[in-house]
Structures are given as C-alpha cells and as structure tokens.
Image (cartoon, rainbow, N blue to C red):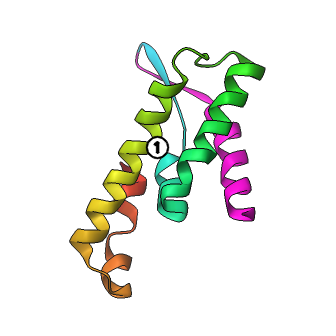
C-alpha cells in the first residue's frame, strides 16, 4: 500500500510537468513504472489520481475519465503481461526485460 501511495503521488506531480516537443508538448505519466511495480493494482491508483486531477486541476475532465483510465492503465497492464510471458517466469528472464514496459 505505501508503494501505491508513493507512485500515485509521483504520477500526480509528474503529470503536471509539461515539456515542449516541437509545436506541442508532452507530460510524464509514469504509467510504465507504476504498472511494472503494481500490476493490476494500477487501475484503482490511476482512477483516484485522474479523478483528483479532474477535480483539483481541471486536467482531463470527468467525461473522459473512463477513456483516460483505459488508455493509461489497460494498455500498460497488457504490455506487462505480454513481456512477462515472453521473458518467462524465472527471475533472470524477468530481469532481462523489465525496462521494456516502463519505456513503452
């Protein structure tokens, strides 16, 4: 539970930082790291974080809350499951590709 709180706070802080890229901007969301460390528990974590962002900062909005949650959490969990299946269940196999879901 403390790890989820830490990653939720990191998600909230990192998503408020906007970095200019070309004519637009991007922001960090850290969903790869959160998905890698929490697995399926990333869904309630991102739901609460996105709900607080919509209420406090007017980021995203309440009408697109489900779409944002699906984009951020579901794709991350599916990528992690695919890479864990590909690398195998051995600790050495997981260690060789732990960075791939975090980078995606």
Extreme residue toward the left, this view:
86
Q: Main secondary structure of the magenta part?
A: helix
Residue at the (43%, 55%) spot, across then down: 102
x%, y% of residue 94?
A: 35, 77
Q: Is residue 55 above or below residue 10?
A: above
x%, y% of residue 69?
A: 50, 34
The magenta region covers: 1-22
Q: Is residue 51 above or below residue 57?
A: below
Q: In the rendered structure, does residue 3 fall within the stretch colored magenta?
A: yes
Residue closest to the eye, 61 or 87: 61
Q: Is residue 85 above or below residue 39?
A: below
Q: Report the side of 12 relative to 34 (left or right).
A: right
x%, y% of residue 17?
A: 64, 31
Among the 4 quarters of the image, the one containing residue 23? top left
Q: Report the side of 34 relative to 2 (left or right).
A: left
Residue at the (58%, 19%) spot, across then down: 60
Q: In the rendered structure, does residue 2 fall within the stretch colored magenta?
A: yes
Q: Residues within 10 Å of mark 1 (few under 14, many from 20)?
A: many
Count of number-bearing discs = 1
Residue at the (67%, 37%) spot, across then down: 49
Q: Report the side of 4 relative to 28 (left or right).
A: right
Q: Is residue 76 above or below residue 92?
A: above
Residue at the (72%, 63%) spot, across then down: 1
x%, y% of residue 54?
A: 67, 21
Secondary structure beneath dot 1 equals helix
Q: Which residue is mark 1?
A: 73
Residue closest to the eye, 22 or 45: 45
């Amino acid at each position: 539970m403390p790890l989820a709180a830490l990653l939720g706070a990191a998600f909230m802080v990192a998503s408020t930082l906007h970095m200019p890229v070309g004519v637009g901007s991007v922001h960090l969301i850290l969903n790869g790291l959160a998905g890698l460390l929490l697995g399926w528990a990333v869904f309630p974590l991102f739901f609460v974080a996105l709900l607080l962002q919509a209420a406090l900062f007017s980021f995203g909005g309440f009408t697109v809350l489900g779409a944002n949650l699906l984009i951020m959490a579901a794709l991350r969990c599916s990528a992690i499951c695919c890479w864990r299946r590909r690398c195998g269940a051995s600790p050495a196999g997981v260690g060789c590709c732990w960075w791939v879901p975090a980078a995606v």
